Amino acid sequence: MRLAAFSELIGPDGVSIIDRPVPEPDPTEAVVSVEACSINRHDLWILEGDSAMVDSDHLPFVSGLDVAGAVEDVGEDVRNVEPGDRVVLCPNETCGTCRYCREGPENLCERFSLFHGGLAEAACVEADRLVTLPDGVEMAEAAALPTAYMTAYHMLRRVGAGPADLVFIPGVTGGVGVAGVQLAAVLGAHSVGTSSSRAKLDRLESLGLDYAIESTDPNEIRDAVSEIGQVDGVLNHLGGAYTQLGLDVMRRDGRMAVCGRTAGGTSEINITDLFLGHKRVIGSTMGTQGDLERLVELVSDGALTPEIDETYPLEETGSAFAAMQNRESVGKLVVRP
Ligand SMILES: NC(=O)c1ccc[n+]([C@@H]2O[C@H](COP(=O)([O-])OP(=O)(O)OC[C@H]3O[C@@H](n4cnc5c(N)ncnc54)[C@H](OP(=O)(O)O)[C@@H]3O)[C@@H](O)[C@H]2O)c1
Ligand SMILES: [Zn+2]
């Protein structure tokens, strides 16, 4: 089978197509014939050599978390799926024995990690991490869901977003950003988001973004959001200067969920404002398999249509990463092996 592997950690030019035998499943595993795998900034960081997880000793490395496809083969102990089933993978890997695995939620697992290996014609995965897809859910839509939509949904739950709340999403045009807008709307909340690109924001408005701010200047954004109203919750996947900005526009007792560091891995925040305003900053990573199951239901019911900017054949995986690196896309980029 063919795989799009990271052969060098030099950015999009480091992707090459290699061949390997189709894997044999262990007793609890399933082999999925990958029909779609969406990419995330997490993969791009690995490819750029900006991840502690993968270095030159691990090359060639096959990334790709968000697998959708058909079950091809199952190990002898697998009961939940059988060959031919249409499935999407929850890429969470958990130990199953720590207190967080016992008491939940599972994404708190002390040994939490993520599946990698979806940028290939077949992927060998833990079968109990597969969610069955109803007939109406397309493979590319399903592949968009696991990392971006599950993370955004979990963050919305963590900030307690509900009807008529105002949710602030700086950097609103990417995977997590667009998911945040669409899912805020599903929950009855309003959204305000930022981007450096007017053209991308125009597309966001048709996806349910209520207020669009074209700016990367924190002072300008602060003023523009303040004119709209007080923010109840912030989805912060940028970090850097956007953390204090989010706190500035948030109402007393508001909540900010943080999942990323695209604009900077450290943030300076005003402690006095934090405690006098009773504000909360909450770290959040991925979501639960139950979150993913609910998202699949929303798509199946027609309440959510994941936004896919572009699909690429396996041999053009490098171009998908170039589009992400160049900030060209709105929503998700999907590779179709
Ligand atoms: N902890 C977790 O479990 C988890 C899960 C998913 C994602 N994440 C993190 O969340 C972040 C977003 O992931 P994603 O896959 O949605 O990425 P993405 O699709 O590449 O996000 C693109 C968005 O980020 C903005 N952006 C890019 N570079 C920027 C910069 N230097 N300064 C300000 N804004 C910038 C873009 O703004 P423009 O519109 O102006 O181009 C666009 O709105 C990443 O940091 C990722 O690692 C974490
Ligand atoms: Zn655990």
Image: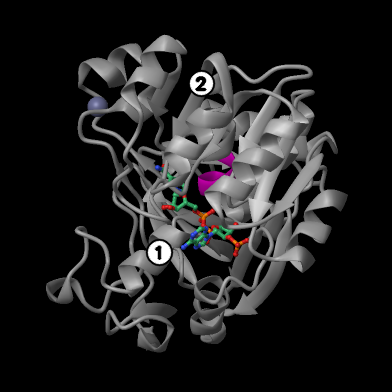
Q: Is residue 74 above or below residue 303?
A: below
Q: Per the image, is 296 magenta?
A: no
Please rate how many residues cluster around mark 1, counting C-alpha atoms within 10 Å: few if below 14, some from 14 to 19, many from 20: some
**Residue 146 percent location from the top left of the image:** 54, 45
Left or right placement of residue 233 versus residue 73 in this view: right
Question: Where on the image, by quarter, is ligand 2?
Answer: top left
Left or right placement of residue 289 versus residue 86 in this view: left
Residue drawn at (30%, 21%) of the image: 101
Left or right placement of residue 75 versus residue 41 in this view: left
Of the pair 249 and 335, the residue shown nearer to us: 249
Residue located beneath label 2 in the image = 255
Of the pair 294 and 48, the residue shown nearer to us: 48
Residue located beneath label 1 in the image = 43
Name the quadrant containing residue 133.
Answer: top right
Please rate how many residues cluster around mark 2, counting C-alpha atoms within 10 Å: few if below 14, some from 14 to 19, many from 20: many
**Residue 189 percent location from the top left of the image:** 75, 25
Q: Earlier in the sequence, mark 2 or mark 1?
A: 1
Residue drawn at (38%, 49%) of the image: 240
Of the pair 287 and 49, the residue shown nearer to us: 49
Q: Tell which tag, 2 or 1, sits nearer the viewer.
A: 2
SS for callout 1: helix
Residue drawn at (67%, 23%) of the image: 230
Residue 269's label in the rendered image is none
In magenta, the rendered stretch is: 146-150
